[in-house]
Image (spheres, helix red, strand yellow):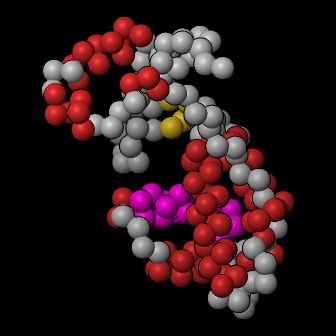
């Protein structure tokens, strides 16, 4: 099979079962960021370099400009420019959006392997941006005390909640749990 990326995406989206909003997002990503760059490329020609180039472009400019100066107009209709019409300034796509685009492609290419359109998945060698590091923000000791005070007002919740109050994380700088360091 010598299908193009566009043909693969069309088939993939036809069979994909997702919430409507998620599907709309994936189709929008494909239409704006995947199809213009590799839509006509035969899937057998894809390799890690092609995906690396795509990700580099997505990190450069979310509008995929050609680096020429132009004005981003507030509307595509005829209008009088005002302060909302501004010179274009390149802005990269966020790492999480690039990861989502990677996973759209990955899912479509896995399907191509299952359908025997490809012998191996070419995206397996590509490197998506790393997942963002979690940034938990546990309550301070004062906030935790307020939470606990409120929960004690409802005896049913306290008795049946199954909470281990001694394991509640507090925002201590020494990584302590339950208000004291454990060894």
- Tell me the quadrant of the picture where the N terminus can be found: bottom right
Q: Vertical placement of 40 versus 96: above or below?
A: below
Picture residue at 57% right of the left edge, 47% below the top: 97
Q: Nearer the viewer, residue 98 or 38?
A: 98
Q: Residue 25 colored magenta?
A: yes
Q: Vertical placement of 108 versus 161: above or below?
A: below
Residue 45 found in image quarter = bottom right
Q: Residue 124 colored magenta?
A: no
Q: How would you classify the magenta stretch by its main secondary structure? A: helix
Q: Nearer the viewer, residue 58 or 118?
A: 118
- Tell me the quadrant of the picture where the C terminus can be found: top right
Picture residue at 33% right of the left edge, 12% below the top: 145
Q: Vertical placement of 164 versus 12: above or below?
A: above
Residue 99 position, x and y percent, is 62, 51
Asked whether residue 152 is in view, the answer is yes
Residue 95 position, x and y percent, is 63, 42
Span shown in magenta: 22-39
Q: Nearer the viewer, residue 95 or 54?
A: 95
Is 12 situated left or right of 118 in this image? Answer: left
């Amino acid at each position: 099979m010598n299908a193009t990326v566009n043909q693969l995406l069309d088939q993939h989206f036809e069979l994909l079962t997702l919430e409507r909003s998620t599907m709309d997002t994936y189709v929008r990503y494909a239409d704006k960021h995947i199809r213009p760059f590799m839509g006509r490329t035969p899937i057998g020609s894809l390799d890690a370099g092609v995906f690396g180039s795509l990700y580099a472009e997505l990190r450069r400019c979310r509008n995929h400009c050609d680096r020429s100066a132009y004005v981003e107009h507030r509307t595509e209709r005829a209008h009088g420019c005002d302060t909302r019409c501004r010179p274009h300034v390149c802005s990269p796509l966020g790492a999480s959006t690039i990861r989502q685009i990677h996973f759209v492609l990955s899912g479509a290419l896995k399907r191509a392997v299952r359908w025997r359109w490809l012998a191996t998945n070419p995206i397996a060698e590509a490197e998506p941006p790393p997942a963002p590091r979690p940034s938990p923000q546990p309550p301070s000791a004062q906030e935790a005390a307020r939470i606990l005070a409120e929960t004690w007002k409802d005896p049913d919740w306290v008795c049946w909640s199954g909470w281990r109050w001694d394991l509640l994380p507090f925002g201590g700088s020494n990584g302590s749990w339950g208000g004291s360091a454990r060894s």
